[in-house]
Image (cartoon, helix red, strand yellow):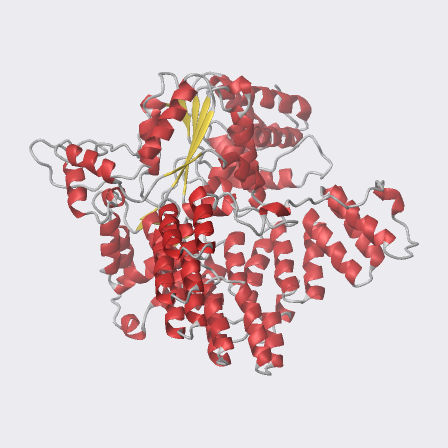
Amino acid sequence: MDFSRPGENASKERAGTSRLIPRPVVPMGPLRELKDLVYEAYLAAGAPTLNEMAAAIAGLAPDDNSVKAAPSRDTIQRIIRTPAMPARQGDVVALVTVLTRMVGGEADQAAQLAARLWLDARLERPLGQPICELDPIDLEVHRAIQVEEGPRSTGSTPLPEYVSRPHDRVLRQAVGKAAAGQSQLVMLVGGSSTGKTRACWEAIQELPAGWRLWHPIDPERPGAALASLAHVAPRTVVWINESHHYLFTPDRSVGEQVAAGLRELLRDPARDPVLVLGTIWPEYRNKLMAEPVPGGPDPHAQARVLLAGHEAIVPAAFDDAAMHELAALARTDPRLAYARARAEEGHITQYLAGAPELLARFEASPPGARTLVLAAMDARRAGHGLDMPHAFLVSASDGYFTDQEWDHLEEDWLEEAFAYAAQPVRGARGMLTRRRPRRGEPAAEGPVYRLADYLEQHGRQTRRLQRIPPSLWEAALRHTPSGPAMARFARSCGLLRTAFQLERREAASGHNEAARRAGDVLRRAGREKEALLWYQKAAEAGDPEAALVAGQLLWQHNRLEEALNSFRRAAESGLREAAEDSARRLVHSRAYTGPGRSWMRLSEKTAQGAVTVNWTTHGRRGDLWRDHRVEKADELRAQGKLEEALALYGTAAEGAPSRYRFGAAALSSQGRVDEAVEWYRRGFEGGDIGAAWRAGRVLREQGRDDEAIDWYQRGAYAGDSTALQRVAYLMRERGRLEEAVRWAQRSAATGDEGALHLTVALLRLQGRDIEAARLLAFGWDLDGSIAEPWGAEDTL
């Protein structure tokens, strides 16, 4: 194709400058033809800069349907410079189209050729690699500890001998069905370093020759999955390790798109068989599987359907059978022998992965390294992404030093702190690992670090009740893109100004949905006029949800014509049904005589019956509780045969710790409080978090406040987000309102959004109405005081 144009010599002279992107070296084939097409278009256009190419694509008219993608500068550079297969067809087509238009050539013809060559290259190079060529460490299987080898050891192998457990049977069955031609999905659910990824690796070794494995990670996990799911071929393992990165994304719509794509892949007969293997932590799994509130939004509907019936639990500890097999294998593998002799309560895989050494190293850290790791723990707890910039960690760590520690730091403390934190532990990653971008990945402005996931989980547990220091929030505002998760956590903590500033900064970077979320912060604080400005800003940028909310606020303020126009914008931007419903209600709510009926084309059906809730599933014992033993125990209790009932309740609870509640309730009703608390303790230690506040309630009713508070705090440490609120309610019942306020604020610091409103109510009970109003509207300051009014300097 001829890309030449007048002034070509000047273009060539320009292309000869030092900024010229070098041509990639690619073997002959469709990919080589695609790369040559792109590069020739780039040279013909005069070798424009990355900024010029990105701006040209972004500057296309919104109604230009010939270009349906907007690749970033980094993506454009990878397409032109690297020999790698471009992830998205649309990115290549957009780039070739714009470059050809710069030349004045036939853009449509060039775009069609680019699209065909991309498809040919994709078909020639199927996704993934042959399983036999893969390294388990590259697939994120944890390295094992290193020990001195004995004369008969096999410790020189990359991984220790494998001990099969019950979840491996589930994996083997899925692999067998996949090998026989039936697509399968298995999601392993378990905590960090429990052996999930290793189990998946062992399972795929049983697949026949010819199977490939695809691990979507570049340029980032959910984006890589979305770009290529449609191109997964038969006999492919889709490896979605740490699946929360794919399904529980900051932008929930992205995770839902990945889930929908996986569902479509699994039911597509043209691509049978495929095997989807994933791993996920329980807390993320529980959030994805949570049933929505009746009538409320359902943000994870696709993920919930995807996972239902396809989960296998990976216990944290080895059972007796696994320990018996471990003992036999330990005779020839010193790593297994070492772990067997030292691991506590059957936590073998965690020990093999170096977790105890990590914890010991953390606890023995010098002040500099300790503060860096604490800052990383809290940052992840607050919603920061996996990669934490060097400058962010340094700034955030300031608030973790005591005055004495700070004064005694050596001049080179920072270098020594990072070196200590990054040092590997028995062959496994250190506490903080510097992540180096792979070839083709965009390079960060400075070094970035990742926290060891076991320490992250340890931090989430042990620091759950700790208030995050101001220095971390200030560092987030200065040094690093935070994303919606960190702003959302700040809002949950009542740090409204910080949440708003984080969202405002994201909006200034071009993230339109952040402008809507900034409006959310203001609206929830009752500052609707200020919120409206931000919703309108987001709506003008094309956010349909913001346009819908803006219309509702305009309607509330009787600005009907503007409201109707905002509903129209929401409908045109994609929320047609909801926007038309709102417009219909507005038009028929009063004697509306203005224009606007013509655009609606609304059906006359009402919203009655639009939301149907099966109330029979609420307010009774659901399937979780159904057990003939429980029902029989209930009958015995009604007959006054309490001891026989307790025996049956105890038997039923052996496999389901939550059922200890029945025996506890029966004992409590008979005034046997200490025995009831003991039953709640059994349930709590078995994993029933809700048993803690129930035990606290029983003790509170007996006036045993100190014991009740102890149980509430146990629940808080275990993950009950409202446990500290219950202490505040207890203090309020006792008339100790100042203490109640302190407990409510402490609850808010953990991310309990309802605690701010509880504090407002407590202040009003004390007659402190002005402070209550200020807290509701402006939240807390970073130092824990009620924030002074803010807004004039933080508006648009």
Q: Quadrant of the C terminus?
A: bottom right
Q: Is residue 71 left or right of residue 465?
A: right
- Can the viewer see residue 663? yes
Between residue 174 and residue 200, name the one nearer to us: 174
Please count the marks in the image: 0
Q: Is residue 583 left or right of residue 517?
A: right
Furthest toward the bottom, the residue is 767
| Residue 183 percent location from the top left of the image | 47, 23
| Residue 504 percent location from the top left of the image | 59, 59
| Residue shown at 45% from the left, 43% from the top | 627
Vertical comparison of 197 with 111: above or below: below
| Residue shown at 58% from the left, 42% from the top | 253
Furthest toward the left, the residue is 151
Between residue 461 and residue 123, name the one nearer to us: 461
Q: Quadrant of the N terminus?
A: top right
Between residue 531 and residue 403, name the one nearer to us: 531
Q: Is residue 478 left or right of residue 8?
A: left
Between residue 527 and residue 423, name the one nearer to us: 527
| Quadrant of the rendered image containing residue 753 | bottom right
- Can the viewer see residue 376? no
| Quadrant of the rendered image containing residue 44 | top right
| Residue shown at 50% from the left, 53% from the top | 481
Vertical comparison of 648 with 268: above or below: below
| Residue shown at 50% from the left, 62% from the top | 752
Q: Is residue 734 left or right of residue 559?
A: left
Vertical comparison of 470 with 599: above or below: below
| Residue 216 percent location from the top left of the image | 45, 33
| Residue 637 percent location from the top left of the image | 44, 54
